[in-house]
Amino acid sequence: MKKSVRSSTIEGRVRVPASKSVMQRVAAAALLAGPAGARILNPSTCDDARAALGVISALGAEVVSGPGEVVVTGGLSPRKRELDCRESGLCLRLFSAVAGLWHEELVLTGRGSLMRRPADILEGALAGLGVSCRTRGGFPPVSICGPLRGGRASLDGSVSSQVLTGLLMALPLAAADSELVVAGLRSRPYVDMTLGILRDCGIRVENEGYERFRVSGGQSYRVGTYTIEGDWSAAAPLCVAAAVAGRLRVTGLDPASPQADKKILDVLEAAGAAVSAAPGLVTVEKRDLRAFVFDAGNCPDLVPPLTALACHCRGTSRILGAGRLRYKESDRAAVLAAEFGRLGARIALGGDVLEVMGGPLSGGEASAHGDHRIVMALAAAAVGALDPVVIEGAESVAKSYPLFFRDLAAAGGRIDE
């Protein structure tokens, strides 16, 4: 599907969808809570959230969706041997550890780009805790056979924190206590998100400087009613569009959230946009934008919308942390440089750094390469381009934000099929 986004004036109010990252973790907690399960309010309905609900259903949970809620009756008793994670990397890595609690083989698979994303980091981490884990040459599908008994394991946190998240969620149900030794952990805010949800669910984890985690075995989840907060990752491209072309009030966000991508407000302020934030309401307004420097190592999903912002800033912006983007839904840093280049942007990619030279975007046609973050970044940049930007593969937004174009249009975005 193609969408054409023209120069626009952004104005109005938009409510962002629920956080898919929080939703997937809470879905796992609901499964592990057994028959008590959970009532999840303000659930995410994106493809990644549906993947997590599909996996917990396959693992034995009863899942009933209603208006504004999902009711889960948990309990690990797999109905299917194969678990479809769709295109969600978090789903694959989180539920590999959860599947390890079962005593028979389960296979986690997926679709599209997920089948090209490395999974070998799971093998060593799980093997030290009693789980047999096999991949297909380091990539999905992933075969898991438990039970996860606990113990001591070492893992590399420099590629992804999602393996750690899966272990932190599964190990409280292991028979023995566990110790995880983590080297080079990145994306710490996502680990904080996991630890916060675990605390909310009555689970105890000792965190020693993000290098060592101690988890007592034999614990029980108590989830109850859990409201999913708004998604800062989804809000970021909308906030950039406002900074480029108008003024927007974004509702449903918590400025005190552990979500990494709330850093978008700091960057917008540094770039000169007018920003105000209060519980439930963030306002962003266009001003004269200037170049910025930002290290996105802990929030790699911000690199696409920040690239869009940098295109409209005076001077050359530097975005660090681009090296972590190779194994996302696309080779994100390379795609950003190539596709924004087709629109007239001047972008240099060197190792871990994207350098973006601000200047008018001419418009044109660009491909999203099947990546939802690229779609939203291109659209955010397009509202300030000289000519329309035609985005090939716009349907990819369904992965995280199915109603993105509806909401952008409601805020003044001029969008055509």
Image (cartoon, grey):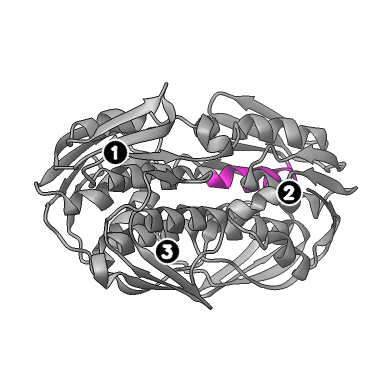
Does residue 305 belong to the magenta stretch?
Answer: yes
Asked whether the beta carbons under mark 1 and mark 2 sit within 8 Å of each other, the answer is no
Q: Secondary structure at mark 3?
A: loop
In the rendered image, which residue does mark 3 sit on? 257
Q: Secondary structure at mark 1?
A: loop
Q: Position of residue 331 (x, y in %)?
A: 60, 31
| Numbered circle sitting on residue 83 | none
Q: Position of residue 242 (x, y in %)?
A: 71, 62
Q: Amino acid at mark 3?
A: Ser
- Labels 1 and 3: the sequence-earlier one: 1
In the rendered image, which residue does mark 2 sit on? 394
Marks 1 and 3, Cα distance to the nearest angstrom? 37 Å
Residue 59 found in image quarter: bottom left
Going by the image, does 383 lie left or right of 124?
Answer: right
Going by the image, does 22 lie left or right of 171?
Answer: right
Q: Is residue 121 above or below residue 291?
A: above
Does residue 141 belong to the magenta stretch?
Answer: no
Q: Position of residue 312 (x, y in %)?
A: 75, 47
In the rendered image, which residue does mark 1 sit on? 105
Q: For the view shown, which residue lies furthest in the bottom direction?
A: 67
Q: Residue at x 37, y 69 (%)?
A: 72
Q: Nearer the viewer, residue 278 or 335?
A: 335
Q: Amino acid at mark 2?
A: Ala
Mark in front: 3 vs 2: 2
Q: Which residues are magenta?
A: 301-314
Q: Position of residue 313 (x, y in %)?
A: 72, 46
Going by the image, does 275 lie left or right of 259?
Answer: right
Q: Is residue 340 above or below residue 61?
A: above
Q: Is residue 291 above or below residue 216?
A: above
Asked whether the beta carbons under mark 1 and mark 3 sit within 8 Å of each other, the answer is no
Query: Badge 1 local density, few (<14 within 10 Å), some, or many (20+)?
Result: some
Marks 1 and 2, Cα distance to the nearest angstrom? 37 Å
